Image: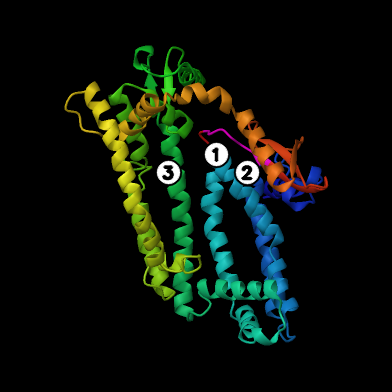
Amino acid sequence: MSLASCNSARTADENPFFVEWDTPYGVPPFDKIRPEHYVPAFERAMSLNEAEVEAIASNNDEPTFENTLLAFDDAGRMLAQVELVFGMICAADTNEQLQAVQEQIMPRLAAHYDRILMNDRLFERVRALYDRRETLGLDAEQMRLLEKTYRGFVRAGALLDAEQKERLKQINADLSVTGVKFGNNVLAENAGFALELSEEDLEGLPQSVRDAAHEKAVQRGLKDKYVFTLDKPSLLPFMTYSSRRDLRRKLYEGYLTRANHDDKNDNKQLVNDFVRLRTEKAHLLGYDSYAAYVIADQMAGTPRAAFDLLEGIWPAALGRAKEELAEMEPLLRADEEGAVFEPWDWWYYAEKVRKQKYDLDEEMLRPYFSLQNVQNGVFFLANRLYGITFRPIAVPVYHADATAYEVLDADGSHLAVLYFDFFPRSS
């Protein structure tokens, strides 16, 4: 017990989330944040947030925009900061420790927000303002905040009875874990797939594609091999240039069947759980379907409106795709008599058509679209459009591949820090 207490105290003292960041521009001190810092940070942030919410809910003064809406909008700053950093790191450079933290913390976060958004006293203060919103003298932005906040409470279950609220809390907890597991399974499937090839399997591949595949093989300890993965910068060039139809199929199906192999990473049951839980949630909240629940808060408003848009585009898109297919099929049959066009043929023969019709070779364009050239082009365009400029800065980054730039306004004043992270990785 003494050892545990000492360790806890040491972690608390060193936890970067418990002190003000003295980094340039106040950016996250990624070089100091470790996986073990997140759970204590989340726990403290949730506790502070609950205290802030309790202060608003227990206020005996008449609800006003300032003591209720603005106070609620300002609450949870630390939690938002911890969530932002944690979510970004999990998406950009996760590991087993972070995945374990996700599975532990996501249900607790779901429960935390449920406690807030289903807090009857807090909701009554918000509803009191909403019911007399036309008499409060609010400007357009204040009215927008009030309406959006009220709808957020309702969509989170504030109008449900006690039994329904308890069921919704359990659904939200289950959904949070399901989402984490689903994403981790896909990540594991991506990392676990490798198409290992020899020199004789590389027919049609440009030298730059071969070099990248060889580098991946060397990283895996395979000297005389070439490795292609399911990451798009590896997959798409192979699908575009490889003349080996059997290998194109293997790589394509590897991508298409991720998490669908009846093993520990299989996602089929999780998909069923998503459907079941989301449908029950939607019905609890008075919607016909989860699609209706989600899109009610979006511009389209209804699933029917979204489908009308898609169905309006579909005939023209399908017609153009058929025209492209008609151009590619003869090329396939010239290579393989009687062959039926398959999805893994599309990129390869689309590239052949480009060369045939336009004398356009994407590989020949590659030197003009180097990463540095494209980035400079984006910077140039942003400057022309908005007057903003970018300058590289030295700040802590979460991975060696990441770079950071300060964004300056037209008058040279500081606007933001922008991170770039261009390269896929197994994490």
Up-down relation of residue 113 to residue 7 (above or below): below
Check residue 95 in the rendering and tell me which mark sits there, or answer none.
1
User: How far, Cα to Cα, is label 2 from label 3?
Assistant: 20 Å
Q: Check disc 3 and report its element: helix, strand or loop.
A: helix
Q: Which residue is rendered at x = 68% and y = 71% of the image? A: 141
Q: Do we see residue 290 in this rendering?
A: no
| Type of amino acid under label 2 | Pro
| For residue 52, side relative to residue 131 (left or right) | right
Q: Which of marks 1 and 2 is nearer the N terminus?
A: 2
Q: Which amino acid does label 3 sit on?
A: Asn
Q: What is the magenta range?
A: 419-425
Image marks 1 and 2: residues in contact by CB distance under 8 Å: yes
Q: Does the magenta stretch include residue 34?
A: no
Tell me if mark 1 has few (under 14), some (14-19) or many (20+) residues whose alpha carbon lies within 10 angstroms of its own.
some
Instruction: Name the residue tied to disc 3.
Output: 185
Q: Residues within 10 Å of mark 3 (few under 14, many from 20)?
A: some
Secondary structure type for disc 2: helix
Three-letter amino acid code at disc 1?
Asn
Q: Residue at x 43, y 22 (%)?
A: 227
Which percent across, then down, holds residue 161? Answer: 47, 81
